[in-house]
Image (cartoon, coloured by chain):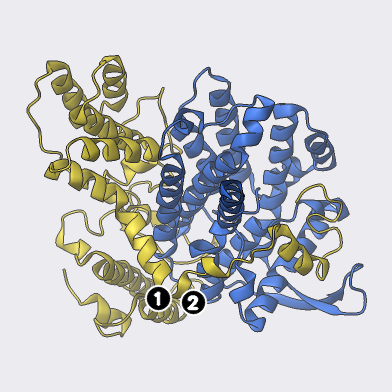
Amino acid sequence: MFGYIAPVLSVLSEEQKRRYRSFYCGVCHALRKRHGQTGRLSLSNDMTFLAILLSSLYEPETGVTGSRCGVHPLKSQAFLSSPMIDFAADMNALLFYYKCVDQRMDDRSLKGKAGEGLFRKAPEKVREAWPVQAEEVEKALMRLWEEEKKPDPVPDMLCNLSGEMLGAAFVPFPQDVWAGVLRSLGTGLGRFVYWMDAWEDYDEDQKKGRFNPLTRYRGRPDYQDFCMETLELLIAEAAQCFEILPLEQDLEILRNILYSGVWQRYTLITEKSGSKEESHAK
Amino acid sequence: MPNDPFAVLGVSSSASEDEIKSAYRKLAKKYHPDLNPGDKAAEQKMREVNDAYTRALQIKKTGRDPSANPYGSTGYNSGYGASSGYGSSYGQGGYYGRGGGYSGQNGQGGQNGNPFGDFGYDFDPFSAFFGGAQSQQRTQYRTRTYANPELKTAEEHVLSNRFNDAISLLNRIPTHDADWHALYAKADLGLGNRISALDHARAAVQMKPGDADYQALLNTIEAGRQTYRRTQSKGYDFRSAICANPCLTCCAANMLLNCCLGGCGRYGLWC
Protein backbone atom coordinates (compact mmCIF):
# COMPACT_ATOMS: atom_id res chain seq x y z
CA MET A 1 0.00 0.00 0.00
CA PHE A 2 0.98 3.59 -0.11
CA GLY A 3 1.01 4.87 3.45
CA TYR A 4 -1.58 7.60 2.92
CA ILE A 5 -3.91 6.31 5.60
CA ALA A 6 -1.92 7.55 8.58
CA PRO A 7 -2.72 9.77 11.58
CA VAL A 8 -1.59 13.34 12.17
CA LEU A 9 0.57 12.34 15.09
CA SER A 10 1.29 15.79 16.44
CA VAL A 11 -2.28 16.35 17.58
CA LEU A 12 -2.74 12.97 19.25
CA SER A 13 -2.39 12.85 23.03
CA GLU A 14 0.52 10.87 24.48
CA GLU A 15 -1.93 8.15 25.39
CA GLN A 16 -3.33 8.03 21.85
CA LYS A 17 0.16 7.97 20.37
CA ARG A 18 1.06 5.03 22.59
CA ARG A 19 -2.15 3.36 21.58
CA TYR A 20 -1.49 3.87 17.88
CA ARG A 21 2.01 2.60 18.26
CA SER A 22 0.88 -0.51 20.10
CA PHE A 23 -1.29 -1.37 17.09
CA TYR A 24 1.46 -0.52 14.64
CA CYS A 25 3.86 -2.74 16.53
CA GLY A 26 1.13 -5.34 16.85
CA VAL A 27 0.80 -5.56 13.09
CA CYS A 28 4.59 -5.67 12.83
CA HIS A 29 4.82 -8.60 15.24
CA ALA A 30 1.97 -10.39 13.54
CA LEU A 31 3.85 -9.98 10.26
CA ARG A 32 6.94 -11.56 11.77
CA LYS A 33 4.93 -14.37 13.29
CA ARG A 34 3.10 -15.18 10.07
CA HIS A 35 5.48 -14.10 7.36
CA GLY A 36 8.92 -14.22 8.94
CA GLN A 37 11.38 -11.45 9.72
CA THR A 38 11.23 -10.14 6.18
CA GLY A 39 7.46 -9.92 6.51
CA ARG A 40 8.01 -6.83 8.60
CA LEU A 41 9.35 -4.96 5.63
CA SER A 42 5.83 -4.68 4.32
CA LEU A 43 4.53 -2.92 7.43
CA SER A 44 2.28 0.03 6.61
CA ASN A 45 0.18 2.66 8.29
CA ASP A 46 -2.71 1.77 5.99
CA MET A 47 -3.15 -1.66 7.44
CA THR A 48 -2.61 -0.35 10.95
CA PHE A 49 -5.75 1.67 10.32
CA LEU A 50 -7.50 -1.54 9.35
CA ALA A 51 -6.29 -3.25 12.51
CA ILE A 52 -7.59 -0.42 14.70
CA LEU A 53 -10.86 -0.25 12.79
CA LEU A 54 -11.61 -3.96 13.01
CA SER A 55 -10.52 -4.09 16.65
CA SER A 56 -12.89 -1.26 17.41
CA LEU A 57 -15.77 -2.89 15.58
CA TYR A 58 -15.34 -6.46 16.78
CA GLU A 59 -13.50 -5.92 20.06
CA PRO A 60 -11.63 -9.22 19.86
CA GLU A 61 -9.78 -10.56 22.86
CA THR A 62 -6.55 -8.67 22.70
CA GLY A 63 -3.27 -9.53 24.31
CA VAL A 64 -0.78 -6.90 25.41
CA THR A 65 2.86 -7.81 25.47
CA GLY A 66 5.91 -5.73 26.17
CA SER A 67 8.86 -6.56 24.05
CA ARG A 68 12.24 -5.16 23.29
CA CYS A 69 13.12 -4.35 19.78
CA GLY A 70 16.53 -4.54 18.20
CA VAL A 71 16.51 -0.86 17.45
CA HIS A 72 15.54 0.17 20.95
CA PRO A 73 16.81 -2.62 23.16
CA LEU A 74 16.50 -0.79 26.46
CA LYS A 75 12.91 0.31 26.18
CA SER A 76 10.14 -2.17 26.31
CA GLN A 77 7.45 -1.44 23.77
CA ALA A 78 3.90 -2.62 24.20
CA PHE A 79 2.30 -4.35 21.28
CA LEU A 80 -1.14 -5.80 20.86
CA SER A 81 -2.13 -9.13 19.43
CA SER A 82 -5.53 -10.32 18.31
CA PRO A 83 -7.15 -12.19 15.43
CA MET A 84 -8.06 -8.85 13.85
CA ILE A 85 -4.47 -7.67 13.97
CA ASP A 86 -3.44 -10.98 12.40
CA PHE A 87 -6.00 -10.41 9.67
CA ALA A 88 -4.69 -6.91 8.98
CA ALA A 89 -1.15 -8.27 8.87
CA ASP A 90 -2.13 -10.93 6.35
CA MET A 91 -3.87 -8.41 4.13
CA ASN A 92 -0.84 -6.18 4.48
CA ALA A 93 1.48 -8.92 3.25
CA LEU A 94 -0.81 -9.84 0.38
CA LEU A 95 -1.28 -6.27 -0.85
CA PHE A 96 2.39 -5.56 -0.44
CA TYR A 97 3.32 -8.55 -2.53
CA TYR A 98 1.07 -7.43 -5.37
CA LYS A 99 2.29 -3.88 -5.13
CA CYS A 100 5.81 -5.22 -5.68
CA VAL A 101 4.69 -7.30 -8.64
CA ASP A 102 2.99 -4.23 -10.04
CA GLN A 103 6.12 -2.12 -9.63
CA ARG A 104 8.26 -4.77 -11.21
CA MET A 105 5.95 -4.99 -14.22
CA ASP A 106 5.60 -1.23 -14.46
CA ASP A 107 9.21 -0.30 -14.81
CA ARG A 108 11.17 -3.39 -13.89
CA SER A 109 12.11 -1.72 -10.65
CA LEU A 110 14.63 -3.53 -8.53
CA LYS A 111 12.67 -2.65 -5.47
CA GLY A 112 9.63 -4.38 -6.85
CA LYS A 113 11.60 -7.39 -7.91
CA ALA A 114 13.24 -7.73 -4.52
CA GLY A 115 9.93 -7.41 -2.71
CA GLU A 116 8.26 -9.88 -4.97
CA GLY A 117 10.99 -12.39 -4.25
CA LEU A 118 10.89 -11.87 -0.51
CA PHE A 119 7.13 -12.15 -0.36
CA ARG A 120 6.57 -14.87 -2.92
CA LYS A 121 5.15 -17.18 -0.30
CA ALA A 122 2.72 -14.60 1.06
CA PRO A 123 -0.18 -15.15 -1.35
CA GLU A 124 -0.32 -18.85 -0.72
CA LYS A 125 -0.16 -18.39 3.01
CA VAL A 126 -2.88 -15.76 3.00
CA ARG A 127 -5.02 -17.82 0.65
CA GLU A 128 -4.88 -20.62 3.18
CA ALA A 129 -6.11 -18.44 6.01
CA TRP A 130 -8.46 -16.16 4.07
CA PRO A 131 -9.40 -17.82 0.79
CA VAL A 132 -12.37 -15.59 -0.01
CA GLN A 133 -10.53 -12.33 0.57
CA ALA A 134 -7.40 -13.45 -1.24
CA GLU A 135 -9.38 -14.55 -4.26
CA GLU A 136 -11.31 -11.30 -4.43
CA VAL A 137 -8.21 -9.18 -4.07
CA GLU A 138 -6.54 -11.13 -6.86
CA LYS A 139 -9.56 -10.99 -9.14
CA ALA A 140 -9.86 -7.23 -8.82
CA LEU A 141 -6.16 -6.85 -9.45
CA MET A 142 -6.20 -9.01 -12.57
CA ARG A 143 -9.02 -6.91 -13.97
CA LEU A 144 -7.16 -3.75 -13.07
CA TRP A 145 -4.09 -4.95 -14.95
CA GLU A 146 -6.20 -5.90 -17.91
CA GLU A 147 -7.84 -2.48 -18.03
CA GLU A 148 -4.52 -0.72 -17.72
CA LYS A 149 -3.28 -2.50 -20.82
CA LYS A 150 -6.04 -0.99 -22.93
CA PRO A 151 -5.13 1.96 -25.13
CA ASP A 152 -7.17 4.62 -23.36
CA PRO A 153 -8.43 3.28 -20.06
CA VAL A 154 -11.22 5.08 -18.25
CA PRO A 155 -9.77 6.60 -15.07
CA ASP A 156 -12.89 5.87 -13.05
CA MET A 157 -12.75 2.25 -14.01
CA LEU A 158 -9.19 1.87 -12.74
CA CYS A 159 -10.09 3.79 -9.63
CA ASN A 160 -13.05 1.54 -8.94
CA LEU A 161 -11.14 -1.67 -9.49
CA SER A 162 -8.39 -0.47 -7.24
CA GLY A 163 -11.05 0.31 -4.67
CA GLU A 164 -12.57 -3.10 -5.01
CA MET A 165 -9.23 -4.64 -4.26
CA LEU A 166 -8.87 -2.83 -0.96
CA GLY A 167 -12.56 -3.34 -0.21
CA ALA A 168 -12.09 -7.10 -0.27
CA ALA A 169 -9.23 -6.77 2.21
CA PHE A 170 -11.49 -4.96 4.68
CA VAL A 171 -13.93 -7.80 5.27
CA PRO A 172 -12.77 -10.50 7.67
CA PHE A 173 -16.27 -11.99 8.04
CA PRO A 174 -18.23 -11.85 4.80
CA GLN A 175 -21.39 -13.10 6.49
CA ASP A 176 -21.37 -10.54 9.23
CA VAL A 177 -23.94 -7.80 9.37
CA TRP A 178 -21.25 -5.13 8.99
CA ALA A 179 -19.55 -6.75 6.03
CA GLY A 180 -21.25 -4.54 3.45
CA VAL A 181 -20.37 -1.30 5.19
CA LEU A 182 -16.77 -2.39 5.80
CA ARG A 183 -16.39 -3.33 2.17
CA SER A 184 -17.76 0.00 0.99
CA LEU A 185 -15.47 1.80 3.40
CA GLY A 186 -12.45 -0.10 2.11
CA THR A 187 -13.51 0.43 -1.48
CA GLY A 188 -13.87 4.15 -0.91
CA LEU A 189 -10.45 4.33 0.68
CA GLY A 190 -8.98 2.30 -2.15
CA ARG A 191 -10.34 4.72 -4.73
CA PHE A 192 -8.97 7.64 -2.79
CA VAL A 193 -5.55 6.05 -2.45
CA TYR A 194 -5.42 5.24 -6.15
CA TRP A 195 -6.32 8.78 -7.15
CA MET A 196 -3.97 10.34 -4.62
CA ASP A 197 -1.14 8.15 -5.82
CA ALA A 198 -1.87 9.10 -9.43
CA TRP A 199 -1.86 12.77 -8.44
CA GLU A 200 1.40 12.48 -6.52
CA ASP A 201 3.18 10.49 -9.21
CA TYR A 202 2.03 12.57 -12.15
CA ASP A 203 5.29 14.37 -12.91
CA GLU A 204 7.43 11.32 -12.41
CA ASP A 205 5.16 9.22 -14.59
CA GLN A 206 5.41 11.87 -17.31
CA LYS A 207 9.18 11.86 -17.12
CA LYS A 208 9.40 8.12 -17.35
CA GLY A 209 6.72 7.84 -19.99
CA ARG A 210 4.46 5.79 -17.77
CA PHE A 211 0.70 5.78 -17.93
CA ASN A 212 -1.08 8.11 -15.55
CA PRO A 213 -4.88 8.30 -15.29
CA LEU A 214 -4.79 12.05 -14.68
CA THR A 215 -3.32 12.80 -18.10
CA ARG A 216 -6.68 13.57 -19.66
CA TYR A 217 -7.41 16.16 -16.99
CA ARG A 218 -3.96 17.72 -16.74
CA GLY A 219 -4.30 20.43 -19.34
CA ARG A 220 -7.25 22.19 -17.80
CA PRO A 221 -6.90 25.52 -16.02
CA ASP A 222 -8.59 24.32 -12.83
CA TYR A 223 -6.52 21.15 -12.62
CA GLN A 224 -5.46 21.64 -9.00
CA ASP A 225 -9.00 22.37 -7.81
CA PHE A 226 -10.31 19.50 -9.82
CA CYS A 227 -7.88 17.09 -8.16
CA MET A 228 -8.69 18.37 -4.70
CA GLU A 229 -12.43 18.12 -5.29
CA THR A 230 -12.34 14.64 -6.74
CA LEU A 231 -10.12 13.43 -3.92
CA GLU A 232 -12.53 14.90 -1.43
CA LEU A 233 -15.44 13.28 -3.22
CA LEU A 234 -13.78 9.88 -2.93
CA ILE A 235 -12.70 10.13 0.69
CA ALA A 236 -16.10 11.53 1.67
CA GLU A 237 -17.78 8.37 0.52
CA ALA A 238 -15.45 6.30 2.67
CA ALA A 239 -16.11 8.59 5.62
CA GLN A 240 -19.86 8.25 5.18
CA CYS A 241 -19.55 4.48 5.47
CA PHE A 242 -17.26 4.83 8.45
CA GLU A 243 -19.82 6.95 10.27
CA ILE A 244 -22.40 4.18 10.02
CA LEU A 245 -20.29 1.68 11.94
CA PRO A 246 -21.07 1.55 15.66
CA LEU A 247 -17.60 2.40 16.90
CA GLU A 248 -16.48 3.69 20.27
CA GLN A 249 -12.99 2.42 20.86
CA ASP A 250 -10.23 4.56 19.34
CA LEU A 251 -12.80 6.67 17.54
CA GLU A 252 -10.68 9.80 17.88
CA ILE A 253 -7.65 8.16 16.31
CA LEU A 254 -9.70 6.76 13.45
CA ARG A 255 -11.34 10.09 12.72
CA ASN A 256 -8.02 11.85 12.94
CA ILE A 257 -6.85 9.57 10.13
CA LEU A 258 -9.95 9.81 7.95
CA TYR A 259 -10.57 13.52 8.22
CA SER A 260 -7.04 14.84 8.36
CA GLY A 261 -4.32 12.23 8.24
CA VAL A 262 -5.19 11.11 4.74
CA TRP A 263 -4.40 14.67 3.57
CA GLN A 264 -0.90 14.80 5.01
CA ARG A 265 1.03 14.03 1.89
CA TYR A 266 -1.26 16.21 -0.19
CA THR A 267 -0.80 19.16 2.16
CA LEU A 268 2.95 18.76 2.32
CA ILE A 269 3.31 18.49 -1.42
CA THR A 270 1.08 21.45 -2.23
CA GLU A 271 2.82 23.56 0.42
CA LYS A 272 6.17 22.66 -1.00
CA SER A 273 5.22 23.40 -4.58
CA GLY A 274 3.46 26.58 -3.40
CA SER A 275 6.60 27.88 -1.74
CA LYS A 276 8.56 26.94 -4.83
CA GLU A 277 6.26 29.06 -6.95
CA GLU A 278 6.53 31.91 -4.48
CA SER A 279 10.28 31.89 -4.59
CA HIS A 280 10.09 31.79 -8.37
CA ALA A 281 7.87 34.85 -8.29
CA LYS A 282 10.43 36.72 -6.25
CA MET B 1 -43.49 0.99 11.96
CA PRO B 2 -43.76 -0.20 15.52
CA ASN B 3 -41.57 1.10 18.24
CA ASP B 4 -39.55 4.23 18.50
CA PRO B 5 -35.96 3.32 17.58
CA PHE B 6 -34.56 5.72 20.14
CA ALA B 7 -36.60 4.08 22.88
CA VAL B 8 -35.37 0.62 21.85
CA LEU B 9 -31.82 1.88 22.20
CA GLY B 10 -32.62 3.65 25.46
CA VAL B 11 -31.55 7.09 24.32
CA SER B 12 -33.46 10.29 23.76
CA SER B 13 -34.21 11.43 20.25
CA SER B 14 -31.79 14.29 20.80
CA ALA B 15 -28.89 11.90 21.38
CA SER B 16 -25.83 12.44 19.20
CA GLU B 17 -24.78 9.87 16.64
CA ASP B 18 -21.88 8.82 18.85
CA GLU B 19 -24.25 8.35 21.79
CA ILE B 20 -26.45 6.17 19.62
CA LYS B 21 -23.42 4.10 18.71
CA SER B 22 -22.46 3.63 22.36
CA ALA B 23 -26.00 2.67 23.30
CA TYR B 24 -26.07 0.16 20.48
CA ARG B 25 -22.83 -1.44 21.54
CA LYS B 26 -24.05 -1.90 25.10
CA LEU B 27 -27.16 -3.67 23.91
CA ALA B 28 -25.29 -5.69 21.33
CA LYS B 29 -22.98 -7.00 24.00
CA LYS B 30 -25.96 -8.02 26.07
CA TYR B 31 -27.99 -9.74 23.39
CA HIS B 32 -25.25 -10.96 21.11
CA PRO B 33 -26.23 -14.42 19.90
CA ASP B 34 -22.76 -15.74 20.64
CA LEU B 35 -23.25 -14.89 24.28
CA ASN B 36 -26.76 -16.32 24.32
CA PRO B 37 -26.48 -19.49 22.29
CA GLY B 38 -29.82 -20.94 21.40
CA ASP B 39 -31.73 -18.15 23.07
CA LYS B 40 -34.46 -17.23 20.62
CA ALA B 41 -35.62 -14.27 22.66
CA ALA B 42 -32.14 -12.74 22.68
CA GLU B 43 -31.86 -13.31 18.97
CA GLN B 44 -35.12 -11.51 18.40
CA LYS B 45 -34.03 -8.69 20.66
CA MET B 46 -30.74 -8.39 18.77
CA ARG B 47 -32.65 -8.04 15.56
CA GLU B 48 -34.76 -5.28 17.01
CA VAL B 49 -31.69 -3.50 18.29
CA ASN B 50 -29.99 -3.74 14.89
CA ASP B 51 -33.06 -2.38 13.22
CA ALA B 52 -33.43 0.42 15.74
CA TYR B 53 -29.79 1.36 15.31
CA THR B 54 -29.95 1.81 11.58
CA ARG B 55 -33.24 3.64 11.80
CA ALA B 56 -32.08 5.99 14.53
CA LEU B 57 -28.87 6.73 12.71
CA GLN B 58 -30.63 7.33 9.46
CA ILE B 59 -33.13 9.67 11.09
CA LYS B 60 -30.18 11.59 12.52
CA LYS B 61 -28.36 11.76 9.22
CA THR B 62 -31.18 12.33 6.80
CA GLY B 63 -34.14 13.39 8.87
CA ARG B 64 -36.11 10.52 7.36
CA ASP B 65 -37.26 7.36 9.03
CA PRO B 66 -36.37 4.60 6.61
CA SER B 67 -39.19 2.43 7.84
CA ALA B 68 -41.61 4.98 6.50
CA ASN B 69 -40.81 3.70 3.01
CA PRO B 70 -41.70 0.33 1.62
CA TYR B 71 -38.08 -0.81 1.31
CA GLY B 72 -37.15 0.26 4.80
CA SER B 73 -35.79 -2.71 6.59
CA THR B 74 -36.77 -5.44 4.24
CA GLY B 75 -33.94 -7.55 3.13
CA TYR B 76 -32.19 -6.81 6.32
CA ASN B 77 -32.47 -9.66 8.65
CA SER B 78 -29.19 -10.34 10.16
CA GLY B 79 -27.42 -10.71 13.38
CA TYR B 80 -24.60 -8.77 14.79
CA GLY B 81 -21.41 -10.48 15.36
CA ALA B 82 -18.08 -11.54 14.15
CA SER B 83 -18.38 -15.16 14.93
CA SER B 84 -18.86 -17.41 12.02
CA GLY B 85 -21.01 -19.55 14.21
CA TYR B 86 -23.96 -17.27 14.00
CA GLY B 87 -25.73 -17.51 10.73
CA SER B 88 -26.57 -13.98 9.86
CA SER B 89 -28.21 -13.56 6.56
CA TYR B 90 -28.64 -10.67 4.28
CA GLY B 91 -32.18 -11.07 3.20
CA GLN B 92 -31.66 -10.90 -0.51
CA GLY B 93 -28.11 -11.91 -0.85
CA GLY B 94 -26.93 -8.57 0.28
CA TYR B 95 -24.19 -6.46 -1.12
CA TYR B 96 -21.74 -9.24 -0.81
CA GLY B 97 -23.60 -11.64 -3.01
CA ARG B 98 -24.36 -9.20 -5.72
CA GLY B 99 -21.98 -10.35 -8.31
CA GLY B 100 -18.83 -8.96 -6.87
CA GLY B 101 -19.04 -5.30 -7.50
CA TYR B 102 -18.11 -3.20 -10.41
CA SER B 103 -19.09 -4.59 -13.74
CA GLY B 104 -17.79 -1.68 -15.59
CA GLN B 105 -17.63 -0.13 -18.93
CA ASN B 106 -17.69 -3.30 -20.92
CA GLY B 107 -20.11 -5.25 -18.87
CA GLN B 108 -23.78 -4.77 -18.84
CA GLY B 109 -23.46 -1.92 -16.38
CA GLY B 110 -26.78 -1.23 -14.87
CA GLN B 111 -28.06 -2.45 -11.62
CA ASN B 112 -26.12 -5.46 -10.61
CA GLY B 113 -22.53 -5.55 -9.64
CA ASN B 114 -22.18 -1.82 -9.74
CA PRO B 115 -21.52 -0.20 -6.40
CA PHE B 116 -22.74 3.25 -7.28
CA GLY B 117 -25.73 1.75 -9.00
CA ASP B 118 -26.43 -0.37 -5.97
CA PHE B 119 -26.35 2.68 -3.85
CA GLY B 120 -28.77 4.28 -6.17
CA TYR B 121 -28.05 7.49 -7.90
CA ASP B 122 -28.22 9.27 -4.63
CA PHE B 123 -25.29 7.64 -2.90
CA ASP B 124 -26.59 6.14 0.23
CA PRO B 125 -24.10 4.40 2.46
CA PHE B 126 -26.94 2.76 4.32
CA SER B 127 -27.72 0.63 1.35
CA ALA B 128 -24.49 -1.22 1.97
CA PHE B 129 -25.93 -2.08 5.32
CA PHE B 130 -29.36 -2.89 4.07
CA GLY B 131 -27.92 -5.19 1.51
CA GLY B 132 -28.84 -2.89 -1.30
CA ALA B 133 -32.53 -3.20 -0.57
CA GLN B 134 -32.91 0.47 -1.10
CA SER B 135 -31.37 0.55 -4.49
CA GLN B 136 -34.79 0.41 -6.00
CA GLN B 137 -35.24 3.88 -4.70
CA ARG B 138 -33.02 5.23 -7.42
CA THR B 139 -33.77 8.85 -7.91
CA GLN B 140 -36.04 9.45 -10.80
CA TYR B 141 -34.82 12.01 -13.26
CA ARG B 142 -37.21 14.40 -14.82
CA THR B 143 -37.32 14.07 -18.54
CA ARG B 144 -36.43 17.16 -20.51
CA THR B 145 -36.98 18.45 -23.99
CA TYR B 146 -33.98 18.50 -26.27
CA ALA B 147 -33.37 20.24 -29.55
CA ASN B 148 -31.12 17.40 -30.60
CA PRO B 149 -33.09 14.13 -30.94
CA GLU B 150 -29.95 12.14 -30.19
CA LEU B 151 -29.86 13.63 -26.72
CA LYS B 152 -33.41 12.45 -26.26
CA THR B 153 -32.28 8.93 -27.15
CA ALA B 154 -29.37 9.22 -24.74
CA GLU B 155 -31.78 10.26 -22.02
CA GLU B 156 -33.94 7.24 -22.73
CA HIS B 157 -30.88 5.02 -22.34
CA VAL B 158 -30.10 6.61 -18.99
CA LEU B 159 -33.67 6.29 -17.76
CA SER B 160 -33.71 2.61 -18.60
CA ASN B 161 -30.28 1.98 -17.06
CA ARG B 162 -28.50 1.37 -20.37
CA PHE B 163 -25.62 3.53 -19.27
CA ASN B 164 -23.01 2.14 -21.61
CA ASP B 165 -25.29 2.72 -24.57
CA ALA B 166 -25.84 6.27 -23.39
CA ILE B 167 -22.10 6.87 -23.10
CA SER B 168 -21.25 5.51 -26.53
CA LEU B 169 -24.01 7.55 -28.09
CA LEU B 170 -22.90 10.70 -26.28
CA ASN B 171 -19.32 10.12 -27.34
CA ARG B 172 -20.45 10.36 -30.96
CA ILE B 173 -22.18 13.73 -30.53
CA PRO B 174 -19.80 16.55 -31.42
CA THR B 175 -21.56 19.42 -29.66
CA HIS B 176 -21.00 19.43 -25.94
CA ASP B 177 -23.57 21.75 -24.44
CA ALA B 178 -24.95 21.78 -20.91
CA ASP B 179 -27.56 19.13 -21.72
CA TRP B 180 -24.89 16.86 -23.12
CA HIS B 181 -22.74 17.21 -20.01
CA ALA B 182 -25.68 16.59 -17.68
CA LEU B 183 -26.64 13.40 -19.49
CA TYR B 184 -23.04 12.28 -19.47
CA ALA B 185 -22.91 12.86 -15.72
CA LYS B 186 -26.05 10.79 -15.20
CA ALA B 187 -24.74 7.92 -17.29
CA ASP B 188 -21.46 8.10 -15.39
CA LEU B 189 -23.27 7.90 -12.09
CA GLY B 190 -25.09 4.83 -13.27
CA LEU B 191 -21.77 3.20 -14.05
CA GLY B 192 -20.17 4.29 -10.81
CA ASN B 193 -17.83 6.72 -12.56
CA ARG B 194 -17.68 9.23 -9.77
CA ILE B 195 -14.85 11.41 -11.00
CA SER B 196 -16.17 11.83 -14.50
CA ALA B 197 -19.69 12.40 -13.16
CA LEU B 198 -18.56 15.26 -10.97
CA ASP B 199 -16.63 16.73 -13.85
CA HIS B 200 -19.56 16.70 -16.26
CA ALA B 201 -22.11 17.87 -13.70
CA ARG B 202 -19.90 20.84 -12.93
CA ALA B 203 -19.59 21.62 -16.61
CA ALA B 204 -23.36 21.51 -17.03
CA VAL B 205 -23.89 23.95 -14.17
CA GLN B 206 -21.17 26.26 -15.42
CA MET B 207 -22.75 26.41 -18.85
CA LYS B 208 -26.28 26.89 -17.56
CA PRO B 209 -25.97 28.40 -14.09
CA GLY B 210 -29.67 28.97 -13.52
CA ASP B 211 -30.85 25.46 -14.29
CA ALA B 212 -32.38 23.95 -11.17
CA ASP B 213 -32.14 20.35 -12.42
CA TYR B 214 -28.45 20.62 -13.10
CA GLN B 215 -27.78 22.33 -9.83
CA ALA B 216 -29.67 19.55 -8.06
CA LEU B 217 -27.64 16.94 -9.91
CA LEU B 218 -24.40 18.58 -8.85
CA ASN B 219 -25.61 19.01 -5.28
CA THR B 220 -26.42 15.33 -5.01
CA ILE B 221 -22.97 14.37 -6.14
CA GLU B 222 -21.39 16.86 -3.80
CA ALA B 223 -23.55 16.09 -0.76
CA GLY B 224 -21.00 13.68 0.68
CA ARG B 225 -18.25 16.25 0.39
CA GLN B 226 -20.31 18.76 2.33
CA THR B 227 -20.94 16.25 5.10
CA TYR B 228 -17.25 15.42 5.15
CA ARG B 229 -16.31 19.07 5.52
CA ARG B 230 -18.85 19.56 8.28
CA THR B 231 -17.41 16.70 10.30
CA GLN B 232 -13.92 17.97 9.63
CA SER B 233 -14.86 21.34 11.02
CA LYS B 234 -16.27 19.73 14.16
CA GLY B 235 -12.82 19.18 15.57
CA TYR B 236 -11.23 16.81 13.11
CA ASP B 237 -9.43 19.26 10.91
CA PHE B 238 -5.81 18.96 11.87
CA ARG B 239 -4.44 19.84 8.52
CA SER B 240 -2.88 23.00 9.86
CA ALA B 241 -0.94 20.87 12.33
CA ILE B 242 0.63 18.79 9.61
CA CYS B 243 4.28 19.34 10.22
CA ALA B 244 6.14 21.42 7.73
CA ASN B 245 8.83 18.81 7.81
CA PRO B 246 9.92 18.30 4.22
CA CYS B 247 9.51 14.60 4.58
CA LEU B 248 6.53 13.19 6.31
CA THR B 249 8.20 9.86 6.58
CA CYS B 250 10.69 11.43 8.95
CA CYS B 251 7.99 11.97 11.54
CA ALA B 252 6.72 8.51 10.96
CA ALA B 253 10.19 7.05 10.92
CA ASN B 254 11.00 8.53 14.30
CA MET B 255 8.13 6.67 15.68
CA LEU B 256 8.85 3.49 13.86
CA LEU B 257 12.45 3.32 14.89
CA ASN B 258 11.31 3.15 18.47
CA CYS B 259 9.11 0.38 17.50
CA CYS B 260 10.01 -2.33 15.16
CA LEU B 261 13.13 -3.77 13.85
CA GLY B 262 13.01 -3.70 10.13
CA GLY B 263 9.95 -1.53 10.07
CA CYS B 264 9.12 0.42 7.01
CA GLY B 265 12.08 2.23 5.69
CA ARG B 266 14.81 0.67 7.72
CA TYR B 267 16.64 -0.11 4.56
CA GLY B 268 15.36 2.96 2.87
CA LEU B 269 13.58 0.78 0.39
CA TRP B 270 9.93 0.82 1.07
CA CYS B 271 9.19 4.15 2.54
For residue A180, say whether it is visible. Answer: no
Q: In the rendering, what colour is chain B?
A: yellow
Answer yes or no: are tags 2 and 1 on the same subunit: no
User: Horizontal placement of A182 versus A210: left or right?
Assistant: left
Q: Nearer the viewer, residue B267 or B61?
A: B267
x then y, percent, for residue B13: 24, 81
Q: Residue A54, which numbered label? A: none
Q: Which mark is residue B21?
A: 1
Q: Position of residue B53 (x, y in %)?
A: 33, 71
Asked whether, in this view, residue B167 is left or right of residue B143, the answer is right
Circle 1 residues within 10 Å: few <14, some 14–19, many ≥20: many
Q: Position of residue B227 (x, y in %)?
A: 34, 62
The kind of secondary structure element at disc 1 is: helix
Q: Residue at x 64, y 66 (%)?
A: B243
Q: In the picture, residue A204 is in which quadrant?
A: top right
Please name whichever residue, A85 or B259, is drawn nearer the observer in this view of the structure.
Answer: B259
Q: Residues within 10 Å of mark 2 (few under 14, many from 20)?
A: some
Which residue is located at x 26 percent, y 85 percent? Answer: B12
Q: Chain of mark 2?
A: A
Q: Is residue A60 above or below residue A229?
A: below
Circle 2 residue: A248
The colour chain A appears in is blue
Q: CA distance from mark 2 to mark 1?
A: 7 Å
Amino acid type of the residue tagged 2 in the rendering: Glu
User: To which quarter of the image does residue A44 belong?
Assistant: bottom right
| Image location of residue A146, percent across then percent down | 57, 24
Q: In percent of the image, x 49 and y 47: which residue is there?
A: A187
Amino acid at the residue labelled 1: Lys
